[in-house]
Structures are given as structure tokens and as C-alpha cells.
Amino acid sequence: MGDLCTDDPFCDPEHPKLVSYDSVQAAKNRLQGEVCRTRCKKSERLSEQYEMNIYLKMEIEQNTGSFKDRGAFNAIKAELKVNSKVKGVISASAGNHAVALAYAGQKLGVPVIVVMPTSAPLVKIEACERCHAEVRLHGEHIGQAKTLGLKLARVKGYTYINGYDHPEIISGQATVATEIFEDVEHVDAVIVPTGGGGLIAGVAVVAAAERPHCKVIGVESEASTGFQQALDKGHPVDTPLLGTLAHGLAVPKAGVNSLATAKSNVHKMLTVREPSLVKGILKLFEGDKIVAEGAGAAGVAALIEGLLSDYMGKTVVIIVSGGNIDTTQVGDILERALVLERRLLKFDITVTDLSSGLSTLGEVAKKTLCNLKKIEQEIQWHSDRNFSIVMKCVVETKNCQHSNEFMKAIAEHFTSSSFHC
């Protein structure tokens, strides 16, 4: 994919810029009245289930639905302080950074251009346009979009603002951690969804200064492990991107400034599987009434996979980084999570008499306290002129054990049945 930092004056691989604690404090002052001070909410349900004191840093409460507001406002205000006649700002982004930059630009009276890959969600494009940003669609991925963004910045004289590596972006995002440590007296670990590294770099700076005992732990999707690979190699490396529900973490190359700032203060990186992200979204939705996007559920996915078991009995803060999930996919994602947890079972039953088959199925569901969600029938014709009827069904159960009880009851009452699980 090449070097994504080429021609970006704030992102020089040969001379990375370290973000200081003083710059974070300056960002904190700039952001007063500009961004929301989000809650650090204790999750009683997660705490009980995983035997930890678990707090959720609710960055979904920001005006654009993600922590990106912090960096966007700070970067633009810092640029205005240096040059009050800023022509405009520009960036390449597939989602939350683009929306946050557009929103901040509108509020601060600065023109904004965002270059988005052609695959960008329509809801994100519309959100940028609603804030009067100029949207350019270009390329299949963020690397190609960035190439055009840097070119436009040179042509128009705009300032290019990298969404995860501009130093003032990192400083602004670091204010998440200052609020965490103000609100929770003792924190053993902060769990940070990680893509290009801007957020984890900012958290690492604050943790080192304010709570050096606190572990900073990053979480990546298995589909995008660029930051872990950068830590292993000692420098950012091109990494392939696979399809992922955690769109916000899908960055092909870690930021040079982010890596340089974070590497000495990140305790470890964790990698979670896609099914765990799906389950994480469901767990937040059911237990804490939180609608999180895939990236926002990454920390909970790590809990689900048992990757944080070392912190039993301790206090852990999970950053729920964003809630900008595609509304057209919410139903499908929640249903998929129920299937993965075996709380929705799809199965076929073959009978010769529909009426008696339906009656027996109803009795089994009633006896096992399961909820029949769907029944369809399909006649199967055979060469001997007889026919059978296949009942295609979906049933809801409480958990995996409950599903096993239902499956056993079906096997006892029907001679021909099959489950799709």
C-alpha cells in the first residue's frame, strides 16, 4: 500500500513527534465547552459476570457519537491559534473522523473537505454533508483516499489532519484518559480499541503521568492487526485489511507519531475474533442498554474471550469508543449474536401430518419454556406418490443449556429432525 505518511508534514517516518503530557493539558483547556464530558459508568452486569469492577467510558455520548470529536476540535483550534486565517482542513476517513472533522469545522467556521473511500457507509457520507463539509469519494480503501486528500491539501492550501496520527489529534483524544482518572479513584487497567493508534497513544501519555501503575491494553480485530505488528517490528508496517465489523479499527498502517508516543507505555495488545465483536455488541445492548459499533465493543469482546482474566477482582475501564453503527444492520447483527450464543435455533422437522406435527411441536415448546419465533412448511413430493411435510422452524431459548434441553426434547418426539448449528 505504500507509505501512508508521504507528504504529510505532521507525519514524518524519519522524525516522529512525541506527544507530551503538557500538550494534553493544553488540549484539555481548548476543549472546554466544545466536547462532552462523557460518563464513566459502572456496569453492574459485566462486573458480576466477570468478577471485576468494570467501568464503561461512554464516548458514544459525544455529539457525533465517537471519541473522534476530541481530536477534531483540538486539531482545528490548535491550527487556528497558529494561523487565524486557515483556508480550510482536509482529511481522508471512512467514518467517524470524517464526521467529527466536519462537525468541528462547522462549529468553528473552518471549511472542511473529507475524502472517503467509495465503500464508505451512506450514513457517514450524509452526516458529513449535513455539516456542510465537501465530500469526495475516491478509492477502494483509506490508503487510496489519503493519496487524493494529500494532493488536494497541496493544491488548495488546506491543512491535512491525519485522523489517528496528527499530534494535536492524539493530544485531544488523550483527554478521554484525564476524565477516566478523575472519575475512577483506582484503575488497574484501561482497555483501548486500537486502529491507527491515536487513542491508545493519548491514553498511554496520561497513564504514564498520572497513574503509572495502570496498565494500558489495546484491542484489535483479527482482521486488522497493524498496531501489534508495528510494536513487534519497531516501526509501522503495511498490513492487509480483511472485512471486519470493527470498521473504525481497520487501518492499514499504524501512525508513526502514535507508535513512537505509545510504545513504551502500552502493556500489551489483544486480538479478538469477529464473532466476539458481534457478541460484544449484543452484551452491551442487553446488559447496559448501549448501542455500540463494532470498534466500540472491542473491549467487551476481549472479556468474552477471557483475555482479561488476569484482572479478576480488579478495576478495569473499557472505552466504548463509538456508537455509529449502521442502523440497517443492527437487527441482523443482534440476530447473528443470538445465533452464535445458541439462543436462536434453526431446525427442520419432517412429518406426514401437519396438524399433529404442529400440535406436538407446540407441546414441546411449552414444556421446555421455549419461544417459537417462526414456522414455515414445505411439501416434499416423492416418486411413490406419498409426500411428507418439512416444518422449517426458529425457536428462542435462554442460553446454550436451554437449547440442549430443547434439542433433546425434539429428538424424543420426532423421528426426523435436523438442527442448523
Image (cartoon, rainbow, N blue to C red):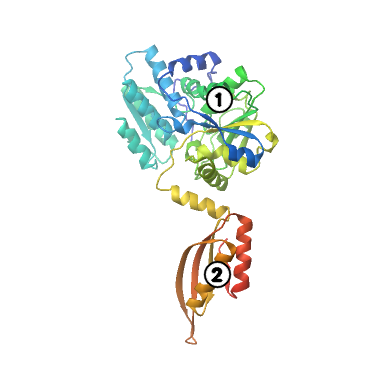
Mark 1 and mark 2 lie on one chain; the one further toward the N terminus is: 1
Q: Position of residue 56 (x, y in %)?
A: 55, 33
Residue 363 marker: 2
Residue at coordinates 60% horizontally, 22% vertically from top-left?
Answer: 207
Badge 1 vs badge 2, beta-carbon distance below 8 Å: no
Left or right: where does residue 189 sit relative to residue 13? right
Q: Amino acid at mark 2?
A: Glu
Q: Amino acid at mark 1?
A: Ile
The residue that disc 1 covers is 180
Residue 138 visible at all: no
Secondary element under disc 2, as helix, strand or loop, is helix
Residue placed most toward the observer, 176 or 359: 359
> In the figure, 242 relative to 24: above or below?
below
Q: Position of residue 110 (x, y in %)?
A: 32, 21
> In the figure, 31 relative to 150: above or below?
above
Residue at coordinates 56% horizontally, 28% vertically from top-left?
Answer: 200
Residue placed most toward the observer, 259 or 39: 39
Residue 418's quadrant in the figure? bottom right
